Amino acid sequence: METHPRRTVLAAALGAAAAAAASGTAQAQGDRGAFVKRRLKAMSLEEKVGQLFTTYAYGQSADSTDPTDVANNQAAHGVDNAAELIATYHLGGIIYFAWSNNVADPDQITALSNGLQDAALGSGCTPLFIATDQEHGLVTRIGPPATQLPGAMALGATHDPEAARAAAVVSGTELRAMGLNQNFAPDADVNVNPANPVIGVRSFGSEPEHVAAMVAAQVEGYQARGDLAATVKHFPGHGDTEDDSHASLPRIDHTYEEWLAIDAPPFRAAVEAGVDVVMTAHLQFPALDESLRPATLSEPVLTGLLRGELGYDGLVVTDSLQMAGVRDGYGDDRVPVLALQAGADVLLMPMDIDLAYNAVLTAVAEGELTEARIDASVTRILELKQRLGLFEDPYADPGLVDSIVGTEANLEAAQALSDRTTTLVVNDGSLPTPTDGGSALVTGWGEATTAGLAAEFGRRGWSATTVVTGIAPTREQIDEAVAAVEGAGLIVVSTNGVAGNPTQIELVEALAATGVPVVAVGVANPYDIAHFPDVVNAYLATYSYAAGGLESAVRTIVGAVHPQGRLPVDIPGTEESGAILFEFGHGLSY
């Protein structure tokens, strides 16, 4: 046999280097483990229990003295501001919302994040998780000038996991630049129920393997830098409900085998991709837990399935504990204790932080929860915070924000992604429009939506008139829209939730009766076309009424881009036969 001494030496060197690297990795992991153990040992029970909670505080700064913020914080938590909240309860994390006055602009968000970390470290606490729900699309907490990217179902329409990964890289990099280190995204639910009131376009689609591939790609994109935790939700799956867990307790009647085939694949893919956090769902799933406890409070679901069957050993966070789906039938003092017993680690937004915090302390004192159980969750929390680099440097650099957040390159990338998502479902040949300008009536749902569409036409030399008819058009509004058609060569009508608002169908039919070409644009769930498939000349699905999606729709209508999106869901007909009107993967082009 011919020998290659140089290759042999190189292989030996590589083997030695690999062994050294493995030894170094093992040593580093051992050092990290020792650090966490020392940190845990130095914490009081009160400090450890505080780490279990992530909640909100009002104000654009950690020490806000704004009278409205102070009043809101006092009403919600009995404190004046976020800094006092952190010091009082040794909080593990803070979550941002627009309604809690946290997210004015990137510079303010960065200063708030740094101020919160100052408050935590200054009061002797552990560095904070700073989180938000930046799913993009329907659920977007931080608006422009931060880059606005297509949401999950829009990205699903690309049928390209690399598109999902690219969007997550941009979003994750911008979030970390503003001091956030945890994003409650992506959504791993498989939206097999068109009537789902709470998931819909937040899902990547209706096919489990398709959703799984997109979810895994987003997890990898968000976590690519190692300084931001992705969070998949809502385990064990929220895609086949007709109730909103914010207002009631939904029930899923899939069998265990159906759960394995439909709901589980995206979560399994996320676990295999190394997702840092899994969020629970507030819903009943009798085949998984016959006690009918909400999944958030179910040991068979969180410990048996998630940790046991899927082999997940990372952090488990509850969905908001203020939602009716978890509170109905349980006291606000019982919910956090039951969630911990079930296997949750982080308790998100309890209704009453003082009640919940003390309920956990009492449960330990009375033996209902052991301190070892608390330690197990706090260990996971500390391990993740260490892995994210928060003990080394939890801060964001204010000097870098403008060079990272909302850059021209990111905005262009977002629009290019959006152009790939627009799906042409129906077209009788009317699109693209044959002129470089003309007169258009833009009508239908959404004041900002119709104005946005009209503005995009105006930028392209069109004269566009708008008539807003709202979510449930009245006869007078329909008549007004029809009257405004005179002189228009094109009608563009935005629809949203037609199934629950059938007078939108009457609007579309009345507009079509004028004889002027009608292009319907479904700006949320793509299912609206099922209610008027033979009425309109063309139908576009944008999966979003964000500015980027509206721009892509108009660019498609006028032929500036060719439609590339393909349906990430089946669109069933409205007949009881259950026949599919447009199949997963359907999409026309020019």
Image (spheres, rainbow, N blue to C red):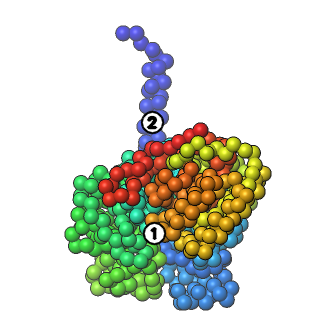
Q: Residue at x 66, y 82 (%)?
A: 64
- Front residue of 4/453: it is 453
Residue 221 appears left or right of 549: left
Q: Residue at x 64, y 66 (%)?
A: 481
Answer yes or no: is residue 378 visible.
no
Q: Count of labels shown?
A: 2
Measured along the vertical axis of the image, is residue 464 above or below residue 460?
A: below
Q: Secondary structure at mark 1?
A: helix
Q: Which residue is mark 2?
A: 18
The amino acid pointed to by label 2 is: Ala
The CA distance from mark 2 to mark 1 is 60 Å
Where, by quadrant of the figure, is residue 31 drawn? Answer: bottom left
Mark 2 touches mark 1? (CB < 8 Å): no
Where residue 465 sits: x, y (%)?
Answer: 72, 62
Where residue 531 sits: x, y (%)?
Answer: 46, 59
Q: On the rendered image, what quadrant is the C terminus found in?
A: top right
Tag in front: 2 or 1: 1
- Front residue of 21/165: it is 165
Q: Residue at x 62, y 45 (%)?
A: 431
Measured along the vertical axis of the image, is residue 241 above or below residue 557?
A: below
Where residue 328 sits: x, y (%)?
Answer: 34, 81
Q: On the rendered image, what quadrant is the N terminus found in?
A: top left
Q: Residue at x 22, y 73 (%)?
A: 291
- Front residue of 243/129: it is 243
Instruction: Tell which residue pokes out farthest to the left in this image.
Output: 290
The disc, 2 or 1, on the residue closer to the chain's N-terminal end is: 2
> Which mark is drawn over residue 500?
1
Q: Secondary structure at mark 2?
A: helix
- Front residue of 428/455: it is 428
The amino acid pointed to by label 1 is: Gly
